[in-house]
Amino acid sequence: MKHLIRAAAGALLVPIFLLAAVPAQAQETFRIGFVNPDRVLREAQPAKAAQAKLEAEFLKREKDLTGQGDALKAASEKFEREAPTLSESQRVSRQRALVDQDRDFQRKRREFQEDLNARKNEELQQVYERANRVVKQVAEAEKYDAILQEAIYINPKHDITDKVIKALNASAVGSSAPAAGK
C-alpha cells in the first residue's frame, strides 16, 4: 500500500515538474513580420532607378511608335477624305498600302511591348533579389522567425516594410557610390 501511495505521489509530481518547466519555454516567443512587396517596388530607390532606366532605354522607340501611329492616322484620315474622288485602282492601291502600314505598326507595337515586358521582368527580378536579401538581413538582425509577404490582415506593429525600404535605400546609396567612381 505504501508503494502504491508513493507511486501515485511520484506520478503526480512529474506533471507538476513539467508545468514548472513550461513557463521557461513559453517565454521564447515566435516573432513574425510582414513586408508589403508592392510598397517596396513603389518606394525603394533601386526600384525607382530601375523604372527610370527602363524609361530612358525605351523612350526613343516609344516616341518613334507614337509618331508612326500619328502618321498612320493622318494618312487614314486623308484617304477617307480623298477616297470619293479617287479611281477604283487608286483607292484599292492606297487602301492596301494603309493596311500594310497598319500591320507593320501593330507588329512594331507588339514587339515593343514584348521587349519592354521582358526588360521590366529582368529589372524587377534584380530588385526582388536585392529586396529579399535585405528582408533576410533585417529578419536575422532583429531575430524574426518568419516574414510574410501576403496576408489577409496584419497588425501594423508587425509591418517591417519601412525598415526594408530604408535598408534597401541605404544599400542602393552604398552600391551606387563605388559604381560612380569607376
Image: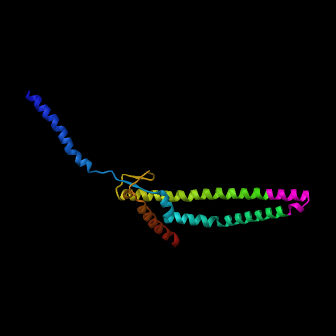
Position of the N terminus, as image quadrant, is: top left
Which residue occupies the foreground of this view, 117 or 88? 88
Eyeballing the image, is 151 above or below 61? Answer: above
x 57%, y 56%: residue: 121
Q: Position of residue 101 (x, y in %)?
A: 78, 59
* Left-right relation of 78 to 13: right
Q: Position of residue 159 (x, y in %)?
A: 40, 58
State whether the magenta stretch is mostly helix, strand or loop.
helix
Which residue occupies the foreground of this view, 127 or 165? 165
* Left-right relation of 15 to 178: left
Q: Which residues are magenta?
A: 82-99
Q: Position of residue 40 (x, y in %)?
A: 48, 60
x 61%, y 65%: residue: 55
* Left-right relation of 25 to 33: left
Report the residue that reaches farthest toward the bottom.
181
Q: Position of residue 8 (x, y in %)?
A: 14, 32
* Left-right relation of 84 to 144: right
